[in-house]
Image (tube, rainbow, N blue to C red):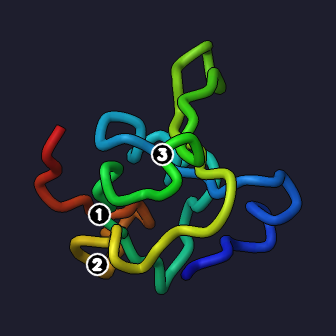
Amino acid sequence: MYEGSADDKRDGFIHFSTAQQLAETLQKHFAGARDLVLLYVREQLIEPEEALRWEPSRGGALFPHVYGSLPIAAVERVEALTLDERGLHLLPELDD
């Protein structure tokens, strides 16, 4: 089980972004950060089902939050993120 980062623990939930939200999240909260990994999480494997909540955040967009621990079995894939010459994260092809 993953319990979340220090920020997640402070906020009381684990922060997630959808494929469409990821680039903005990286730019806003992790600009220039190295050694980041991207987790692909299958939401159907998050138990209990009510632990995953879609809540408004930036501009009213709904962001997924997990209240509780993230089961490692819900993580389908892990990819290291790299930076380009401008310090922006290079994103792989993401499924919607």
Which residue carries the number 1 mark?
A: 40
- Contact, CB < 8 Å: mark 2 with mark 1? yes
Label 3 sits on residue: 49
Q: Position of residue 79 (x, y in %)?
A: 26, 78
**Helix, strand, or loop for circle 1?**
strand
Task: Please name the amino acid that badge 3 sits on.
Answer: Glu
Q: Eyeballing the image, is 96 above or below 29?
A: above
Query: Residue flagged by tag 2: what amino acid is it?
Result: Val
| Residue found at x 25% / y 59% | 91
Residue contact between numbered discs 3 and 1, judged by CB atoms under 8 Å:
no
In this rendering, position of residue 11 left or right of residue 64: right
Q: Observer-nearest residue: 25 or 69?
A: 69
Residue drawn at x 40%, y 46% as measured from the top left:
22
Label 2 to label 3: alpha-carbon separation: 22 Å
Query: Which label sits in the foreground, 3 or 1?
Result: 3
**Measured Cα–Cα span from mark 3 to mark 1:** 18 Å
Left of 21 or right of it: where is 67? right
Residue type at numbered disc 1 = Tyr
Quadrant for the N terminus in the image:
bottom right
Residue 59, image x and y in percent? 61, 15
Name which quarter of the figure residue 41 lies in: bottom left
In whole angstroms, how far apart are the C-alphas of marks 2 and 1?
6 Å
Image coords of residue 57 (percent x, y): 65, 26
Structural crowding at the residue carrying mark 1, measured as other residues with C-alpha within 10 Å and reported as few (<14), some (14–19) or many (≥20): some
The residue that disc 2 covers is 78
Residue 16 point in image, percent of width and height: 51, 50
Q: Which one is nearer the viewer's eye here, 9 or 25?
A: 9
Quadrant position of residue 50: top right
**Residue 42 or 95: which is nearer the viewer?**
42
Is 50 situated left or right of 40 in this image?
right
**As displayed, is residue 25 above or below residue 84?**
above
**Picture layout, residue 53 above or below residue 11:** above
